[in-house]
């Protein structure tokens, strides 16, 4: 089962930036742990700080992969274009956030992506990704959410 983990802006700085919020591990180190923990899943990781590149990646894998774990970072709250891309693809998407976005600034409380995702996992640190992968591994979901086929 091919699953993409897709990270958006500033997540390349995990382990360096705001350690009190995001922890002290790089995502690359954590990704190695995830690939060992989920041998039945064919995991791919991609990160970009650029909105269009994220959209291109969603289009590239969104009709062939079985699922996407997506942390869009700050684009979660602002990007109609990413929202439309998630809506347009067939692969189910799980929205993840390392921090609890509802315990942060008010502008972070609204997700443009959530209506088109199978679900959202927030506030469990890097373990948010593991929880999303467990969902894919156990339930093998189809796309659900507003406007799903």
Image (cartoon, grey):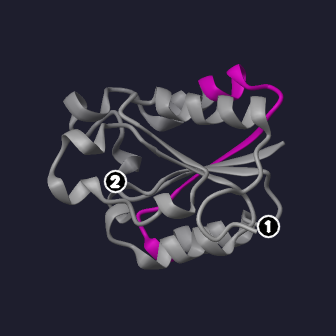
Q: Residue 111 at x, y = what percent? A: 37, 60
Q: Which label sits in the foreground, 2 or 1?
A: 1
Task: Classify 10 Å Cα crowding around label 1: few (below 14), some (14-19), many (20 and above).
Answer: some
Task: Report the front residue among 98 and 36.
Answer: 98
Secondary element type, mark 1 = loop
The residue segment tinted magenta is 33-52
Specify the quadrant that holds the N terminus. Answer: top right
Q: Position of residue 149 (x, y in %)?
A: 76, 68
**Residue 9 appears left or right of 20:** right
- Inspect the magenta stretch and tell me whether residue 91 lies in it: no
Q: Residue 24: image x %, image y %? A: 32, 26
Mark 2 vs mark 1: which is more N-terminal? 2
Residue at image point 80% right, 25% down: 39
- Label annotation for residue 19: none
Is residue 35 rendered magenta in the image? yes
Image check: 112 left or right of 44?
A: left
**Relative vertical location of residue 96 with respect to residue 82 in this rendering, above or below:** above
Q: Nearer the viewer, residue 99 or 28?
A: 99
Q: Secondary structure at mark 2?
A: loop
Residue at which label 2 appears: 10
The residue drawn where x is 36% and y is 39% is 14
Q: Is residue 99 left or right of residue 94?
A: left
């Amino acid at each position: 089962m091919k699953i993409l983990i897709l990270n958006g802006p500033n997540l390349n700085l995990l382990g360096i930036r705001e350690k009190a919020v995001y922890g002290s591990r790089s995502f690359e180190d954590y990704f190695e742990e995830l690939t060992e923990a989920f041998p039945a899943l064919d995991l791919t990781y991609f990160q970009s700080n650029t909105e269009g590149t994220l959209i291109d990646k969603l289009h590239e894998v969104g009709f062939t992969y079985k699922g996407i774990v997506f942390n869009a970072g700050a684009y979660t709250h602002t990007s109609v274009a990413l929202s439309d891309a998630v809506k347009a693809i067939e692969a189910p998407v799980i929205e993840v956030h390392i921090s609890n976005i509802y315990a942060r600034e008010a502008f972070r409380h609204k997700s443009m992506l959530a209506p088109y995702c199978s679900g959202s996992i927030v506030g469990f640190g890097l373990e948010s990704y593991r929880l999303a992968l467990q969902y894919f591994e156990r339930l093998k979901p189809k796309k659900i959410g507003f406007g799903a086929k």
